Amino acid sequence: MNSKLNLFIIFVLQAFFFACKTTDKAIHTEAPIPGNFRNAEVLSDDSISIANIPWRDFFGDATLQKLIDTAITHNVDLQLAIKNIDAAQATLKQARAGYTPNVNLQVSANSTNPSNNSLNGISLNQFLGSNHIEDYTAALALSWEADIWGKIKNQKAEALAAYLQTEEAKKAVQTQIVSYVAQGYYNLLMLHEQLKIARQNLALNDSTLNIIQQQYDVGEITLLGLEQAEAQRLAAASLIPDFEQQINIQENALSILSGKLPEAIAMQSTLDDIRIPEKISAGVPSLLLSRRPDVKQAELAVVAARANQRYARASMYPSLTISAQGGVNSFKSSNWFNIPASLFGTVAGGIAQPILQRRQLKTNYELAAINHEKSVIQFKQSVITAVGEVSDALIALNKLEEKQSIALNRTNKLQSAIHNADLLFNTGMANYLEVITAQSNVLQSELELAQIKKSQLVAVVDLYRSLGGGW
């Protein structure tokens, strides 16, 4: 008996020894972080990132703050992300319960009537004087698996990483919502500004057309000049319904993004009221690992995949299970709860070592290892993408500032030119074509200037989001 016990102990120790020797190869997960963002030296003070600024402080416009707050509360995608967090939290609670034993209560009553010609039937008649036997049992059964190889530990680690991933996913959705609302709001401001410009230009065309009409009536210009002036007025007038249509569509988009039915949005600010920050701090690229939710989510995916790989490896090792059962048992109902005579109890321990399972366990481990490597690649790519998005936003801000300076200078000159053209036209020193051309050029330049201002604001929002701001 002792020799058998010794062999059993040796077998367990050998299994433990070889299991401990088998370790997965470490995979280099260091992210490719540069020392600084490209173009950061132009616009950025690297001491602090604007991503650390809460969105309520970053966006000072009251209407925009209200829109963002409503979207965060009612947006459908964000609500779904919150439900995913609830589901992951339930899974995490289940994984944490893995260390507790299974306990079952069993109550049973059996009556067996064997054949009188069977061995059991003859034995019953000889010993009990009856042709049937009854059995009554009430027992508690307990089963617990020792976490020798860390299966339960790694299941818990994977569930925790999955839960944290959903938290980061919710943050990522919120940063996108904040960005989309802000961009939509700035686009709405631009459309209102362009509508105002179009109406002012239409009024200017009306004034010019009246003068040309008077000159045509007295025979100073031909019908061709009058028709060209009328065509120019109609071209300016056609912009108004187009801008009004775009305003309504943008209002609908912002309403839907906020989880509401389409409705009008009362504007309290103009495009000129929104100021672009003079100094924009992007911080250092390493901050993306802690600030940007999608990067953090990809990093947690590596943690979850590594835990799953370790769980798959541990599944190939022996499992030690301890079970116990105790309760009352009697073949007579009258003696069922006769304590302590009817008490019984058993304790057992067993080790099960998988041997042949159609290569399933090894395949699971190999797939888990591959998925781990894939998650590492995806994490590195997420970092590269994040750094690229920040660099894109920085260069956009830089070049749009240059473009805005040129467009503003051009607009000022054209506005001066149209004033001079009107004076010359009224004194007969300029013809109607010069006036019409000047008016058309000013219209396009002012519309372009509004577009550039909106693009600058959108670039600021892109930089804020790409740095991980908004949650």
Image (spheres, helix red, strand yellow):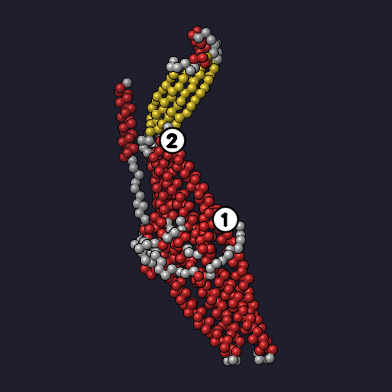
Q: Position of residue 80 (x, y in %)?
A: 53, 50
Q: Residue at x 55, y 80 (%)?
A: 441
Residue type, label 2? Gln
Q: Residues within 10 Å of mark 1 (few under 14, many from 20)?
A: some
Residue at the (36%, 52%) spot, across then down: 29
Residue for badge 1: 259
Q: Determine the secondary structure under disc 1.
A: loop
Q: How many marks?
A: 2
Q: Position of residue 272 (x, y in %)?
A: 51, 72
Q: Mark 2: which secondary structure?
A: loop
Q: Is residue 455 left or right of residue 18?
A: right
Q: Which tag, 2 or 1, sits closer to the chain's start?
A: 1
Residue 357 numbered mark, or none:
2
The answer to which of 32 and 61 lies nearer the viewer is 61
Residue type beneath disc 1: Gly
Q: Judge from the rendering whether residue 235 lies leftward or rightward of residue 5; answer left or right.
A: right
Q: Residue at x 59, y 56 (%)?
A: 260
Does residue 220 sit above or below 445 in this rendering?
below
Depth check: give the residue in front, 84 or 276. 276
* Relative image position of residue 322 (x, y in whole percent): 39, 29
Q: Please provide percent x and percent y for residue 153.
A: 39, 40
| Picture quadrant of residue 3 | top left
